[in-house]
Image: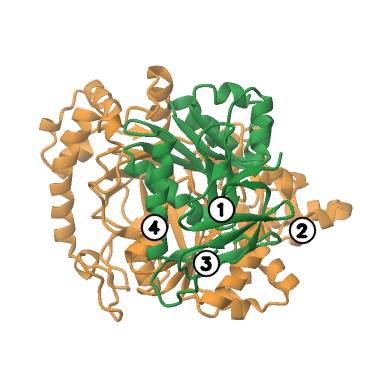
Amino acid sequence: VTALPAADSVYFDAGAETMSRQELDALQWSLLEEMLPHAYEHAPLVRATWNAAGVTPRDVRSMDDLRERVPFVSKDAIRRFRDERGDPFGGLLAVPLEELTAVMSTSGTTGDPTLVPEQWGRGRGPAALARDFWGMGVRPGDHVSLVLFTFRGPTYGFVQGMGGVPLLFDFKPDEMRRLAEASLEYRPTGLYNFGSALIHAMAEACDAAGLDPTDVFASYRGVVFAGEPLGRRSRAVAEAWGVELFEHTGVGDAMYAFECSRHDGLHYWEDAVLVEALAPDGDAPVPDGERAELVATTLFNRVAPLVRYRSDDLVRISRERCACGRTHGRVWPIGRKGDEVVVAGRSVLPLDVWDAIEGVDACARGLFQVVRTAREADVLRLRVGYAPAWAARLGPVHDDVCGAVEAAVGVVPEVELVEDAALLRLGPPHKIPRVAAR
Amino acid sequence: VTVTGETTDAPLWGVGSYHDGTRVVAWPISQAEMDRDLRAGARVVAELGIGPGGRVLHCSMLSEAGQFWPLVVGTMLAGAQLSCADATAGEAARVAMFLRRLPYDAVLGLTPALLDGLGELRVDPAELLAGVRVVGARPGAAARLREAGLAPHDLVLCGPALAVARAPGEPARVDTDEWELDTDGDTVVVTSRRPRTRRFARTPTGARGVVVDGALVPAA
């Protein structure tokens, strides 16, 4: 869009957000016709992978060719290329190094952070977050609270780009008192990012300051959580304050998806990414609605183009028009393929035990890890965090966790209890790796 | 000192924060103020010798964007590349990752917490930063880096103003068109010299040191 839409517009970019499936398909192919040769010519990993498969861009003349002939790229392949070739960008950099504006990084929750090369001001994709925040109810002139890290750079630009004013906070529990006070002073309409640790910290901060969280959040039209799921208990705490929660997820660093006001799946913008749903243990396409591994191809990122990136993310997807009127696909995250443990024939993912663990009072922050030494295991081993106030009553806590998990997944777990703080030290603050190798 | 009044109706760039000596408080910044600060930030980057082909790692918090965004933009305007990390112990792994994978001309904003985090990872900061020409370190971190044999530039948040030494051992300077530093005892206070959405008049900053010719020699 070249100008901001009218404030009463339902969509930020109605033409793009509601284009027909045929138009989306045609747009995707026209973008791929540009992107695939560029990726092959300039991204060393893409070129090496295609050459090994005996494929060149001339062999890919249709979407069917892409699905049948183009080889996959995985995070392991990127890291291997990086380590074996000494290429810090893992073979994905497809523009001259000197043309980059910035080198940012991924969160690193599942391992080493990887470098994210960026070229600002050129070849930008659609204004995805502006569409999402507009849909949530944020309008020009509004204040928007941002509670974030800096490792992805100046993320507040999207708020300013849609005529809003960012209120800037660190992603730390001890910022919650300040967030509460600023919310009362500036009356923001949007908040990003408000996960489980911050929700509980906000409850404590309001309690200590004598503030009513319902009043604090009265102006917000939407509050976004991202980075990891939100358990039922934390969600209930926030919703009791009158907060409407929206989920935002990154899928394998290749794409993003954001819940709309219908809260029926997370939209991914199909003018930014081509999404395929494939069998997790093979290459066959999976029908909409069934469990699949998400495979993503960028349509606009010429700097580090991921082509048929096997994300390791298990999802269900739908390409049906949403009740919100948008035509772009929706995704329902299930978990990461590499996180799955099969115990006595039962598949268990972290999300399957999340609500059960968080439902135990001592473990309300939902800090836990599945200890996974192999995909198949005789025992479900869990490392579960507890609040220090419960240190003298760990026997009952242990029994409660075991009982709740068994009720949820039908497997009696082996539980190691550790203080919340011990788990928080393991990852980026307030977000931890949900699977541990030991 | 001429203390200018508040301008209350200017379009806002954003709401950052500053430390007033006892706590962190909200700091509304107009677009016009930020435009002035961006020009000053570009001058700082140039005076640090950062230019085309360079690369700078900025270590700061999102709440400090009002003070650090001018340096970030200045880095881009200089034709150099930038990277960002939070200035916390937990981000030490990211800082180490950046510095091991790519050459950097400057690392700005190192904190004691980041050095603690590097220590937990058993990373020697002197070794990690050996090839970095400009190391900008905050109070507490600068002294530790000097003990480790490095020659950091002092970089001090003085409330809403950022003081940066242009060379190791020199006092840290703020943009004196915008800010005036003074002391109240050994505590640094700041005054705004041009119209701002929030007026500062000998506002405590939490920084400590001695002000000489408008520049800050931070307390050891």
Q: Is residue A212 above or below residue B162?
A: below
Amino acid at the residue labelled 2: Ala
- Give the camera-side residue of B135 and A317: B135
> Is the residue at mark 2 from the same chain as the one at mark 4?
no
Label 1 chain ID: A
Marker disc for residue B36: 4
Quadrant for the C terminus of chain A, please: top right
Circle 2 residues within 10 Å: few <14, some 14–19, many ≥20: many
Amino acid at the residue labelled 4: Arg
Alpha carbon of mark 3 to alpha carbon of mark 4: how far? 18 Å
Alpha carbon of mark 4 to alpha carbon of mark 1: how far? 49 Å
Q: Position of residue B183 (x, y in %)?
A: 67, 55
Q: Is residue A408 above or below residue B196?
A: above
Amino acid at the residue labelled 1: Leu
Quadrant for the N terminus of chain A, please: bottom left
Of all chains in the rendering, the one displayed in orange is A
Residue A378 seen in the current view:
no
Secondary element under disc 2, as helix, strand or loop, is helix
Q: Colour of chain B?
A: green
Circle 1 residues within 10 Å: few <14, some 14–19, many ≥20: some
